[in-house]
Image (tube, rainbow, N blue to C red):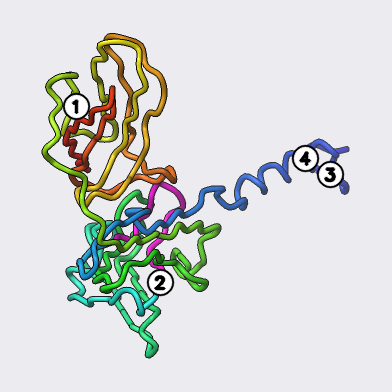
Amino acid sequence: MKKNEFPTKPSRLGLVILLSVFVLVVSPSLADVNLAILPATVSVQPGEIFDVELTITEAGSAFNGYDAIVGFDPAVMTFIERSPAEQEGPLMTDACNYIFYRFEVSSSGDTLTINHVMLCAATSVTGPGVVFRLRFQAGQQNATTSINLLEGTAFYNAGLFVNPVFTWDCEVQISDVSPVPEDLVSAPVNLIAAPNPFNPMTTISFEAAEAMQARITVYSSRGFLVAELLDEQVSSGQNSVVWNGRDTQGQMVGSGTYLVRLELGGESFMQRVTLVK
């Protein structure tokens, strides 16, 4: 074979190298988009107004637009529409000043369609962050319902669909139960939460005079159970447990003030904690 002359058939090693380079160049990213309606669990009283946020929960595939289809039961809650500036989340608007925005409520009143696209050239985002905010008013009857991300919810980047997309819905509990009593004291057992305020976790410590059964639960400011942290026999002296800001379903709760309740030796004690994000 003459110098600089290539063989008519490439070697097997050459094919392997060429295919490897091709795979590296054209293989799509294995990242994904995770969209959740947060808080994952909302506890409200009849007639109460509340907000939820469409949130990209973690960094993933880049996107510059999305369509979100949100469903809810208009028999137990009412959607309250606000201006685009109040509804649009900061994740996209902070990255681009030029946004295509279309929002529609279905004629049946049970579906919301959101079209949201950044129009800045070569601009995309990955999260985490809030992309949209929705406001509702609970009905007057006790109910357990949900706000759902429906089929048709999709993300895209430069005109191409981004896949896969994973979605998480929100459970709404409407109840007129009385709040947890607020006149409970914590001094006798030195019930302390530190840090407080906290993000993303706080350590709750207390003293027990002797070995006994202890139960620690977390409630919303309205008195709804959010999480159970401890229900077991503890030893005398100092004891502690960590709350990671998640509810009974393992979902992160929203910013706000929560009530930590300790049941120990036939008595109950209370400590307020504040989660900030």
- Counting labels gives 4
Residue that numbered label 1 is attached to: 195
Separation (CA) of disc 4 from disc 2:
47 Å
Position above or below: 144 against 56: below
Label of residue 100 in the image: none
Does residue 232 show up magenta in the picture?
Answer: no
Assess disc 1: are there few (<14), some (14-19) or many (≥20) residues with their C-alpha within 10 Å of its C-alpha.
some
Q: Is residue 81 placed above or below 225 in the rendered structure?
A: below
Q: Nearer the viewer, mark 3 or mark 2?
A: 2
Mark 3 or mark 2: which comes first in sequence? Answer: 3
Alpha-carbon neighbours of circle 4 within 10 Å: few (<14), some, or many (≥20)? few
Q: Which residue is mark 4?
A: 16
Report the Cα–Cα distance between label 3 and label 2. 55 Å
Q: CA distance from mark 1 to mark 2?
A: 36 Å
Per the rendered image, the range of residues in magenta is 52-66
Name the residue beneath numbered marker 3. 10
Distance between the alpha carbons at the discs numbered 4 and 1: 56 Å
Mark 4 is on which residue type? Val
> Of 60 and 274, which appears nearest the observer?
274
> Which numbered dot is residue 70?
2
Amino acid type of disc 1?
A: Pro
